């Protein structure tokens, strides 16, 4: 239940971010950070239930569709924020961060 709740809250935060979106915005909005926080938590809750939980795939897939449209600096900032969320809540967000890195290639773009 907590995984689904956080997934929905992440979707709501992203919808708010879309409404407030300013074309060419360089930084990361509070709504985007809120969405990432909820997606990190949803991923961890789904993983606690089952590594193959359907909600986990839904979380990662829905996130990807939105994040792929952001700029490299925004992606990097959100990836760093996700790591901070994991640290604050003392949770293992490895799966979330691996998806972020492999799917979006943020670290390769920054270092390359």
Image (tube, rainbow, N blue to C red):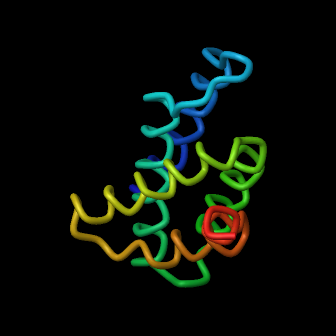
Q: Residue at x 25, y 65 (%)?
A: 87
Instruction: Give the image location of residue 51, x and y in percent.
Output: 54, 84
Can you name the residue that lies furthest to the front here?
A: 112
Residue toward you, 16 or 51: 16
Can you name the residue that lies furthest to the bottom here?
A: 51
Q: Is residue 105 above or below residue 28?
A: below
Q: Residue at x 57, y 76 (%)?
A: 98
Instruction: Give the image location of residue 57, x and y in percent.
Output: 67, 68
Residue toward you, 72 or 70: 72
**Count of numbered circles in the view:** 0
Q: Is residue 71 left or right of residue 5?
A: right
Q: Residue at x 43, y 29 (%)?
A: 30
Q: Quadrant of the C terminus?
A: bottom right
Q: Residue at x 64, y 63 (%)?
A: 106
Image quarter of residue 70: top right
Q: Is residue 111 left or right of residue 50?
A: right
- Report if residue 51 is visible in the image: yes
């Amino acid at each position: 239940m907590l995984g689904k709740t956080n997934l929905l809250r992440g979707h709501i935060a992203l919808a708010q971010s879309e409404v407030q979106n300013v074309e060419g915005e360089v930084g990361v909005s509070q709504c985007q950070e809120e969405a990432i926080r909820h997606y990190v938590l949803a991923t961890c809750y789904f993983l606690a239930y089952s590594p193959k939980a359907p909600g986990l795939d839904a979380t990662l897939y829905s996130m990807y569709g939105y994040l792929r449209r952001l700029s490299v600096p925004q992606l990097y900032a959100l990836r760093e924020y996700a790591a901070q969320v994991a640290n604050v809540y003392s949770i293992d967000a490895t799966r979330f961060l691996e998806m972020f890195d492999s799917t979006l290639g943020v670290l390769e773009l920054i270092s390359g």
